[in-house]
C-alpha cells in the first residue's frame, strides 16, 4: 500500500512539475518577439526579396547572428510559407523552443556523465526553463543566443567519454558565442570555467579549440566579408567614440542596472546564495577552487553589460541563465538548502510582482531604494546560505524546485509588466500588439512593389515590401542625422548610395520618430527631394507613424 501511495505521489509530483513548466512557457510565448528580433527578421526578409545577396545585407548585428536568424526564418518559411507577420511570433518561438530542448538534452547527457543524475537534472532543467521563459527583451537577442550556445558548449564538451572528442565538439559551439556578438565572448569563458569544474583537461583543450576556431572565423570574415569587419568597427564607434575604460560612473551604472535586472527577474537575487551553497558542500582545495570559479563566472556574466556601456536589460541574459543553473544545481545537490531557497524565491517573486505593477513614475522615483534593497537581499541570502546549506532539515521533493523556479521566472513575461523596472524601456509593456494595419498597407501598395525604407526594421517586418537597398533599415543615415561624427564613417557613405543607385523604389517609407529628416545632412535631404515627392499633396495616406512619398516620374 505504501509503495502504491509513493508511486501515486511521484506521478502527481511529476505532473505538477510539468504543468507548472508548461504554464510558464505558454505565458512567455504570448508576448510579441521584441523589436530588435523583428528588426533583424525584417531587414533580412525585405532585402532578400529585393534581390540583395544575403551576405551583403546590413542588420546591425555580426555575421554569426545574421546566419542564426536567417536559419530560423527559413525554417518558418518552410513550415508556413510567407505568412503574415503576426504568425511569425509563434512559429519562430516554436522553432526556438525545440532548439532549446535539444541543447538541454545535450547538456543533461554531458553533466550526467561527469556529475551524476541529480546534478544533471537540476542544472539542465533550470537552464532550459530560464532560456525558454526568458524576459521578452532577452529572448533571441544575441546575448541570449550566446547563453544558449554556452550551455551547448558545456554539454558537448562533457558528453563524450574521450576528452579530445569533447574539445573538438565544444570548440565550434564556443566560437559561436563570439561570432553572434563580439562583446559576448566572456560567456564562452563561463562555459570553459564550468567545464573546468568537472574536467580541467577538457576545459584546457576546449579553450585551445575555441581560440583556434575563433581566430579562423575572424580571419575568414575579414578576408571574404570585409564589410562585416567595417560594420563591426563602425558599430563600436557608434557606442563608444573613445576607447572604453573603467570609470567610476560606469561602475555605478552597472550596479544600478544589475539591481534593476534583479527586480525584473528575481532569480538573480537567488543566484549568489545558490553558488555559496554549492561551494559550502565542497571541502579543502575544491572549496577554494569553487569559490574562484563562482566569482569569475559572475564577473564574466556582467562583463558584456559593462563592455557595451549601454546597460540594456538584455545584456544580463547570461546572468539570468547562470543564476538559474546555479539554483537548479543547489536544489538538486544541497537538500538542506531547499526549503530556504524556496522561501527566499517566493518572497522575492512576490515582491517583484507587486513592484512591477506600480506606475512608471513611481518606479522611476523609487528606483534607487528598490535596487539597493534587492542587492542587499542578495548579499544577506548569500551569507545565510553558508549556514543553511550544510544543515539537514525538511528536504522538499524535486518537483517543488520546478514549480518555484517556474514562478520566479514569470514576473518579466506577464502581460502588462514592463521591459525593465526603471531602466531603459521601463515604459514598454509586455503584451501582444498586431502588425495588421502595416501588413495590410504593404498589401495595398502591392506585396511585390519595391520601396526604400527609412524605418526601423520592425516596420519592414510588418509591411514585407521588397527593397533593393542593402541597408534595409538605414542605421547610418538615421544616426548621422543626430551624430554628425558618424557621417565620416565608411558605412555612412555606403548607406548613402541607396539614395543614388537603387532607383527601382516606387515609394519612400519614412518612420516618424525614428528617422529625423529635417536634421539629416543636406545631401541626404537633397537626394530624397530629387527622387521622391514628399509634399503634403503627394503623400500616400498611411497608418502612423509612417509618411509615404511616391517616386517622382
Image: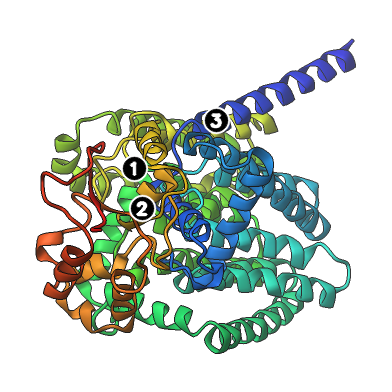
Residue 124 lies, with reference to residue 143, above or below; the image says above
Contact flag, marks 1 and 2 (Cβ < 8 Å): yes
Q: Label 2: few (<14), some or many (≥20) within 10 Å?
A: many
**Residue 313 tag number:** 2
In this orientation, which residue lies closer to the viewer: 150 or 334?
150
Classify residue 172 as left or right of residue 356. right
Residue 417 lies, with reference to residue 461, above or below; the image says above
- Identified at 53% across, 64% down, the residue is 66
Q: Label 1: few (<14), some or many (≥20) within 10 Å?
A: many
Residue 383 lies, with reference to residue 7, above or below; the image says below
Q: Secondary structure at mark 1?
A: loop
- Identified at 24% across, 84% down, the residue is 242
Q: Secondary structure at mark 2?
A: helix
Classify residue 105 as left or right of residue 145. right
| Separation of marks 2 and 3 at Cα, in angstroms | 20 Å
**Residue 419 tag number:** 1
Can you give x and y, in whole percent of width and height, for residue 122 in the image? Answer: 68, 45
For disc 3, the marked residue is 24
* Outermost residue to the top: 1
Classify residue 552 as left or right of residue 403. left
| Separation of marks 1 and 2 at Cα, in angstroms | 8 Å
Can you give x and y, in whole percent of width and height, for residue 376 in the image? Answer: 31, 49
Task: Tell me if I can see residue 386 in this picture.
Answer: no
* Nearest to N terminus: mark 1 or mark 3: 3
| Separation of marks 1 and 3 at Cα, in angstroms | 17 Å
Q: Label 3: few (<14), some or many (≥20) within 10 Å?
A: many
* Outermost residue to the front: 553
In this orientation, which residue lies closer to the viewer: 432 or 257?
432
* Nearest to N terminus: mark 2 or mark 3: 3
Amino acid at each position: 500500500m505504501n509503495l502504491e501511495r509513493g508511486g501515486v505521489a511521484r506521478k502527481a509530483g511529476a505532473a505538477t512539475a510539468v504543468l507548472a513548466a508548461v504554464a510558464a512557457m505558454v505565458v512567455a510565448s504570448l508576448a510579441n518577439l521584441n523589436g530588435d528580433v523583428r528588426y533583424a527578421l525584417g531587414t533580412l526578409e525585405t532585402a532578400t526579396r529585393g534581390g540583395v545577396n544575403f551576405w551583403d545585407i546590413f542588420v546591425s548585428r555580426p555575421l554569426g547572428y545574421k546566419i542564426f536568424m536567417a536559419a530560423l526564418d527559413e525554417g518558418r518559411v518552410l513550415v508556413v510559407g510567407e505568412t503574415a507577420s503576426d504568425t511569425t511570433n509563434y512559429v519562430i518561438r516554436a522553432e526556438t523552443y525545440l532548439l532549446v530542448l535539444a541543447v538541454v538534452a545535450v547538456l543533461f547527457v554531458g553533466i550526467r556523465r561527469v556529475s551524476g543524475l541529480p546534478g544533471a537534472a537540476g542544472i539542465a532543467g533550470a537552464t532550459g526553463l530560464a532560456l525558454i521563459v526568458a524576459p521578452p527583451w532577452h529572448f533571441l537577442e544575441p546575448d541570449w543566443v550566446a547563453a544558449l550556445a554556452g550551455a551547448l558548449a558545456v554539454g558537448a564538451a562533457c558528453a563524450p567519454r574521450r576528452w579530445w572528442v569533447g574539445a573538438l565538439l565544444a570548440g565550434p559551439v564556443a566560437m559561436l558565442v563570439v561570432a553572434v556578438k563580439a562583446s559576448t565572448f566572456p560567456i564562452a569563458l563561463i562555459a570553459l570555467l564550468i567545464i573546468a569544474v568537472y574536467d580541467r583537461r577538457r576545459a584546457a583543450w576546449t579553450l585551445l579549440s575555441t581560440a583556434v576556431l575563433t581566430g579562423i572565423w575572424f580571419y575568414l570574415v575579414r578576408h571574404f566579408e570585409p564589410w562585416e569587419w567595417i560594420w563591426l568597427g563602425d558599430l563600436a564607434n557608434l557606442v563608444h567614440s573613445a576607447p572604453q575604460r573603467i570609470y567610476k560612473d560606469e561602475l555605478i551604472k552597472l550596479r544600478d542596472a544589475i539591481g534593476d535586472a534583479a527586480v525584473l527577474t528575481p532569480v538573480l537575487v537567488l543566484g549568489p546564495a545558490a553558488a555559496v551553497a554549492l561551494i559550502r558542500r565542497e571541502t579543502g582545495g575544491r572549496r577554494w577552487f569553487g569559490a574562484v570559479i563562482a566569482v569569475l563566472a559572475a564577473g564574466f556574466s556582467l562583463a558584456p553589460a559593462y563592455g557595451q556601456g549601454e546597460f540594456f536589460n538584455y545584456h544580463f541574459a547570461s546572468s539570468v541563465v547562470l543564476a538559474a543553473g546555479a539554483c537548479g544545481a543547489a536544489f538538486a545537490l544541497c537538500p538542506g538548502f531547499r526549503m530556504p531557497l524556496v522561501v527566499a524565491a517566493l518572497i522575492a517573486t512576490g515582491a517583484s510582482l507587486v513592484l512591477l505593477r506600480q506606475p512608471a513614475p513611481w518606479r522611476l522615483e523609487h528606483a534607487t531604494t528598490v535596487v539597493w534593497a534587492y542587492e542587499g537581499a542578495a548579499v544577506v541570502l548569500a551569507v545565510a546560505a553558508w549556514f543553511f546549506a550544510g544543515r539537514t532539515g525538511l528536504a522538499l521533493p524535486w518537483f517543488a524546485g520546478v514549480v518555484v523556479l517556474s514562478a520566479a521566472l514569470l514576473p518579466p513575461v506577464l502581460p502588462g509588466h514592463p521591459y525593465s523596472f526603471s531602466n531603459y524601456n521601463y515604459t514598454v509593456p509586455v503584451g501582444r500588439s498586431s502588425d495588421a494595419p502595416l501588413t495590410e498597407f504593404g498589401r495595398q501598395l502591392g506585396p511585390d512593389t519595391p520601396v526604400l525604407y527609412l524605418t526601423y526594421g520592425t516596420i519592414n517586418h510588418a509591411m514585407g515590401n521588397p527593397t533593393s537597398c542593402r541597408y534595409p533599415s538605414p542605421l547610418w543615415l538615421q544616426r548621422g542625422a543626430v551624430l554628425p561624427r558618424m557621417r565620416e564613417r565608411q558605412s555612412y557613405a555606403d548607406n548613402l548610395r541607396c539614395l543614388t543607385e537603387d532607383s527601382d523604389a516606387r515609394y519612400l517609407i519614412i518612420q516618424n520618430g525614428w528617422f529625423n529628416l529635417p536634421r539629416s545632412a543636406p545631401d541626404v535631404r537633397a537626394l530624397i527631394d530629387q527622387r521622391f515627392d514628399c509634399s503634403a499633396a503627394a503623400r500616400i495616406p498611411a497608418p502612423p507613424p509612417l509618411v509615404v512619398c511616391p517616386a517622382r516620374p
